[in-house]
Every structure is written in C-alpha cells, then in structure tokens.
Amino acid sequence: MPEMPELETIKRSLEPHIQGKRIKNINLLLSRQIKHPTPGEFVNRLLFRVIDRLERRGKYLILHMDNQISLVFHLRMTGQVCYCPPGAPEQKHARIVFNLNDGGSLVYADSRTLGTIYAMKPNELNQIKGLAELGPEPLSADFTLEYLEKVCTGRQGAIKSFLLDQSVIAGLGNIYVDEALFLAGIHPIRTPASVTADELTRLYESINKVIADGINDGGTTFRDYRDGNGDKGSHQDNLFAYGRDGQPCRKCGTIMQKIRVGGRGTHFCPQCQMMN
C-alpha cells in the first residue's frame, strides 16, 4: 500500500499538471469504487469544477474544488492517480477518468479495485472514518518527541503494530515502520512501554528520517506504485530492512530475518535489533 512518501510524491507530481484545471467530462468505468455520494451525484458535484489545490493527509490524497467539494482518494493496495497528457495511450486498469480543459486527463487506475473514492462536502469529510481519526504526521509540528513519549507510555502489544495504527501516527505503513525500527535499533515485538528514553529519541528521529528519505527518492516501488507522471520511485534501492530477509544486514552483516507481527510481514536484524 502506498504510504506517506508515495502519496506526497503523487501530490507534488500532479500539482503542475492539474492545479487550476477544469474538469470537462467524467468517465465512470467502475463506479462501485465511489463510496460517497451516489455515482450520479458524484459526477454532479465535480463536473465543470476547477481543481483549486491539492492536499495529502496521511495516506489520503485530497483535491479541493472551487465549489468546496473535496475529491478524496484512498489508494489502498494498487490504486494509482496519474496525469495523462493529450494524446497519451489509454491507461491500463483505468477505473475513473477525469477529462480536463487542457486536453489531458486525470486517471484513477486500480488493478485490484480495492481503493475508495469520495466527493465530499465540508461537513461530510468526517464520515470518512480513517481520515477523521488520523493522528499527527511525521515531519509536522504536531509530531514531537513529547507526543511520541506520551502515546508510548504504558502501551503494551508489539511496537510494530502500534506504529501502524494511523490514529497514533498518520502515514506510516509496513515499509517505513520496519525501516524506522531498524534505524532505531528496536526489535519489532517489544512493547512501546519498554522503550527507553534514548531509544524513543532515536525512534522519533528515525521516523522523520525514513519519511523524508522516502519523499526525496520519489517513494518506494516494488510492484504497483507510480507517481502522478506514471514514474517509479527509487527508494527500494536504499532500504535497510524491508524486503531484505535472507540478506546480510547493511550495518553488521548478520542475516536479516522475517517474522509476522500482527499479521504483517516484518523484517529486522537479530543483532542490531536485539530484544534486550
């Protein structure tokens, strides 16, 4: 699933192409991925509207229209949002096509059709439960070391699962949690309550670092992720933990391992991330 760096990259790469453009036509190729309102009302709310600005919140991409409607995308596993210039070939797995006044189009594509799309009035946005309950994001003023210390205090369960909770920290997913825990030297099945003050400081710094590095590299592409131009990210070439089970640790040379934590594949170094 695309995480915060991927969604931020999509937002930044789309902005030059679609901000200020008007939607001239909407082609609903698979309307069941529209979760609110009805497909007909979805079209009515967006047709002939201008895309005022783009926003990303956690793993959600939000396009704000000139009539205060927010077009919200949650890409889930295989969703893609990209700009196709005039004359570009038809996008594979296209599900909704927004034709723009420059002759190009904004295309939502999704091979597994797990993503969700909304066209919401301001007073309806809180109906998207996952969006309404998001915690602070890495690299934001609200995500402080003091906040991390507070939410970890007394918390039991695996810290890997804890960090995946979007109501605790928005935007983190499997890839970047594994990376942050590796850089901080924290075993993924330790409890948040067991993490020391020094480890918390390292974890806080590591979370911000892995997110910033992911954004700088244009996101991580293993299979489906593409930015708004249809390009792959390159951060997969710079990972320390995720997907490296069976390979030597880039810090100490110990063979990396993979376990399941909370049902999620989890990669770590048994030497650099000891249970203590």
Image: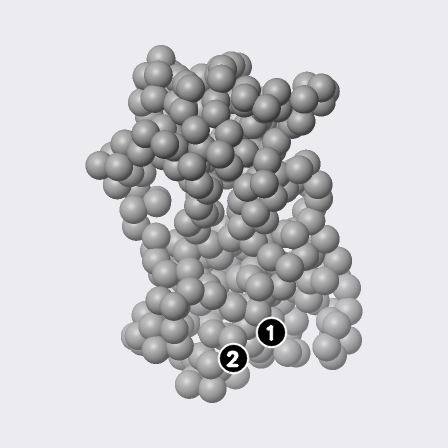
Which image quadrant is residue 131 in? top left
Q: How far across and down, in percent of the image, does residue 59 sit?
A: 46, 47
Tell me the residue at 29%/46% (across/down): 132
Work out whether residue 65 or residue 109 is closer to the camera in this orientation and state it: 65
Work out whether residue 166 or residue 232 is closer to the camera in this orientation and state it: 232
| Mark 1 element type | helix
Type of the residue with mark 1: Leu
Answer whether labels 1 and 2 touch (C-beta < 8 Å): yes
Residue 23 horizontal side relative to residue 219, left or right = left
Q: How far across and down, in percent of the image, does residue 32 sit?
A: 43, 19
Residue 64 horizontal side relative to residue 261, left or right = left
Query: What is the basis of the colouring in this image?
Result: one colour
Tell me the residue at 77%/69% (across/down): 248
Which image quadrant is residue 232 in? top right
| Residue 125 seen in this snapshot | yes
Residue 251 horizontal side relative to residue 268, left or right = right
Tell me the residue at 51%/75% (across/down): 205
Choose the circle earlier in sequence order: 1 or 2.
Answer: 1
Please tell me the numbered disc located at residue 183.
1
Name the residue at the left extreme. 123
Type of the residue with mark 2: Arg
Q: How far across and down, in percent of the image, does residue 80 sit?
A: 58, 34
| Mark 2 element type | helix
The residue where tag 2 is placed is 202
